Amino acid sequence: MRVLVVSGFLGAGKTTFIQELARRTGRDFVVYENEYGQADIDAQVLSRTDELSVWESTENCICCTGKQDFASSVLTIANTLDPEYLVVEPTGVARLSSVVDNVNQVSYERISLLQPLVIVDVLAWARQRERFEDINLDQVASAAVVVLSKVQHAGAGELDAVRAWVAEKNPGARVVDVPYDRLDDAFFSSLLENDLDPEGASASAAQGAPVDDDFESLSLAGIDLPSESHLLWFLDALVAGVFGEVVRAKGTLPCGG
């Protein structure tokens, strides 16, 4: 089993990328989905992709408080499901260096680690870097491939700025700045072929308090809104900060008809 870690901050586009990876390659996948919070929205989305089997984890972040459970799950998946590939999607606030280190702890002749990648949202990276610098820096510095998302909505200045920042923090990384749907199949296949050099892998997990301590999570179930106008008002208020600083929000709900 070969393990591909697809990292990236909250809302960067990891789930969409994994869906595209499955569609383009058609390989035998299991996805280990580590969601932050009580409701695993991304796992629900991924489970609707025919090519994917999804293993959910919502209890702890796999880079710190849940690393022992993660290691056990990787071994269980390898020994019971035995897929050709395991794609790991850590929570957006996980440190990639720690996730890579945790996979390395259980690597042996039947489990190997592919070159990890990180997805960076070009529209939000500057704000996220300022607010959550340690997490963003670790994810970018620990990745072999840096995929820029939402580039079709960015100006030339924004792209130049994020490219320069990535080049400064991780000069050896391969930077991909093309929208997912314009990347050729060969690119996606290459992600499943390039093993991580053990000598170049991170050997030390991030130190300090678990990243979970910096965030609060709220999940709501069984809710609805009477009309589309109510939803638009709510989203406007959310963006404006009426409810405080909301780093990420995702979900589905009935809205009018």
Image: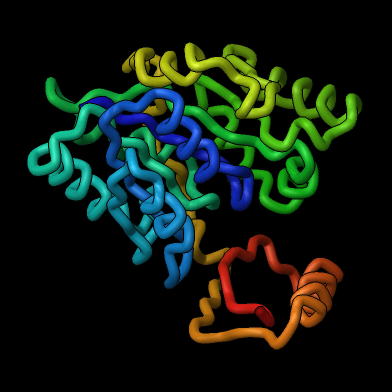
Image quarter hosting the C terminus? bottom right
Q: Is residue 88 above or below residue 170?
A: below
Task: Residue 52: name its quadrant.
Answer: top left
User: Which residue is at the far left?
Assistant: 79
Q: Residue at x 46, y 55 (%)?
A: 45
Q: Is residue 52 above or below residue 155?
A: below
Judge left or right: residue 97 versus residue 65. Answer: right
Judge left or right: residue 229 versus residue 18. Answer: right
* Residue 223 image offset from top left, x and y in percent: 57, 85
Q: How is the image coloured?
A: rainbow
In front of the other: 88 or 244: 88
* Residue 68 image offset from top left, x and y in percent: 24, 52
Judge left or right: residue 140 versus residue 99. Answer: right
In front of the other: 156 or 213: 156
- The mark total stands at 0
* Residue 64 image offset from top left, x and y in percent: 38, 53
User: Which residue is at the far front?
Assistant: 257
Q: Residue at x 65, y 36 (%)?
A: 120
In front of the other: 148 or 225: 225
* Residue 157 image offset from top left, x and y in percent: 91, 27
Q: Residue at x 41, y 27 (%)?
A: 202
In front of the other: 112 or 191: 191
Q: Residue at x 35, y 58 (%)?
A: 65
Image quarter hosting the N terminus? top left
